[in-house]
Each structure stands twice: as C-alpha cells, then as structure tokens.
Image (cartoon, grey):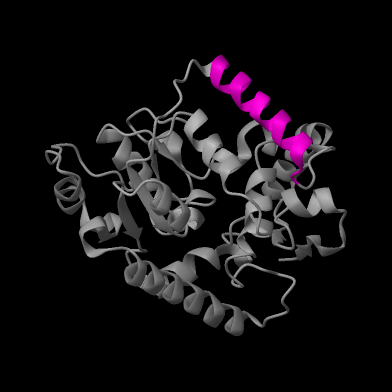
Amino acid sequence: QVSILAQGTPKLHRNYMCHYGVIRSDLKMIMAWVIFIALALPGLADVEECNSTSFLQTKVDIKQHVSSLKVQPSTGIKIIGAGFGRSSSTSVECALARLGYYPAGGSITFKDFGKFRPPWLDWAKGGSFEPCLQQVLQFGYNATTSDQPTGLAWKEFMDRFPAAKVLNIEHPLGAQGFVDSVAKDDWYGCFTGQQDLMSYFMDCCNFQLNFTDSKRREVCANDYIRTHEKIKRTVPAHRLLTYTAADGWKPLANFLGLPVPDDDFPHLSGGRTNMCPWPLYV
C-alpha cells in the first residue's frame, strides 16, 4: 500500500484532502477523491480566512440555506456535547434525535462544500465565537454532539447557555479505543477534512508534526485523556453526564428527564447519519 502525503499540495487541496493527512491509494478511494475534488474545487476557490466581508456573506448564505430547507432558527442550546468525534458521537446524535432534539453533528462545516467553515477556523485562531454560535442557531439546532466543530466549543456553549446540560461523550473503549479509531486505515480516521481545525485543539492529527506511528498514538491518547479530564473538572456535577453509546438509553434519558425509549439504541459509526432511523437535521 502506498500513502500519499497532501503536504506539498496547494492550500485549498490541503484543507480538503485531509490537510496534511494520509490518503490510502486503493482504487476506490482515489476515484472518490477525484470526483470530490472535481465537484468541490470550483466552489471553494474563494474560501479563505474569516473577515468582516466574508462573515456578512456567510450570514446571507446561512439565511438562504435555512430558508431553502424551511428550518426555523433555534432559540438556544439545551444539550451540549463535549469531547471529540470518533467516540460514538454519531450514535449519540441519532439517539438525541429519537429523544426529540435537533443535534448538530459533524456535517455543519461540510455544508455547501465548506462555505460555512471560515468562522470556525477564525474562532480556533482566537477570533470571536459569535459567528459560529449564530450558524448553529440559524440552522435550527438545539443540541450539539462531541463531533467537530461543535464538540470543541463545549466551554463556549456552556457559558452562553447556563441551563444547558453537558454530555461528556467518551469512546466506549476509552483512550485506546479512540486511538484505534483515528489510526484506522493509515490514520485516515484522523478527522479527514477537518485536520486544520483540529490542529488548534490537539496534536494527534496534526501531520505537520513528524511523529513516528507509536509516538502519534501516545500523543492521541494523551490528547483524549487530557481533554476529558478538563471537561470533568470544569463542568459542575449537576450539569454533567459522562456517557458512552455502550451505556444505552437509560442513563441518557434519565439525565434529560425523559422516558426511556423502547427502541433499540442506535449503534452507528463513521458519521453514517443516513443509517439513523429517526430524522436528523443535516
């Protein structure tokens, strides 16, 4: 198997071809990326740093996008997912939909070929969180998951919505399970397409850092442990539930004050929201 590093490609290619990530060269994967690039690049030519002009245009784009979907803007966030993706976040997203919420998963920065990504990158670099918050509310979401980008902003959401409850969403197999998930297929699981954003919050998937495989695994485990320990230290106990999809319905429903569903708990993976039997905002 041959690995292709995206490090030498132009900026736009880096952002959408794993951003310093590794792409496995089996035929299906190559064809998928060829098709994706052919479709995406023309519409991405002007995606750059966030500034006042791009923010105003983004606000217009959001309103047009929401209007076309007939989505009502949200008045606030009731449930905050904290942590990282690759930790059963898709299962939790689907479960929250079953419980009557409209959760924001990992799709928000991929909408319309990434036109809504710049405010999140600007925030990661120290900019205002307000444009990101307004995105989430305008899209109608009233809950978030641990998936990026919203899972990275748990503290910001928590401060803005003091009545919201917080889910510390962990991998069912702990730090080692998280590491195995992101390292899957020559690190293809390492937040493909989001690595530029993730690099501001963890070193695990920053492929500009020339780690050996074993060192990268160690770094990923430490990033995971440090983040979840911070969540537990920061969030008041009465607002926090440390949770994994392996726990099923009961602790989640009890924490939210809702009846325990009779349905089987959804065990999904890899962002496969299309497998959720209940409607999701995507």
- For the question of whether residue 193 can be seen, the reply is no
Expressed as whole percent of the image width and height from the top left, the position of residue 80 reads 37, 49
Q: Tell me: 102 left or right of 84.
A: left
The quadrant of the picture occupied by the N terminus is bottom right
Residue visible at 69% across and 58% down? 196
Q: Tell me: 153 left or right of 267.
A: right
Q: Which residues are magenta?
A: 50-68
**Camera-side residue of 126 and 232:** 126
Classified by dominant secondary structure, the portion drawn in magenta counts as helix
Residue visible at 72% across and 76% down? 209
* Figure check: 229 above or below 22: below
Residue visible at 60% across and 84% down? 215
Q: Tell me: 19 left or right of 257.
A: right
* Figure check: 220 above or below 99: below
Expressed as whole percent of the image width and height from the top left, the position of residue 26 reads 70, 54
* Figure check: 95 above or below 149: above
> Would residue 40 be counted in the magenta stretch?
no
Expressed as whole percent of the image width and height from the top left, the position of residue 36 reads 73, 38
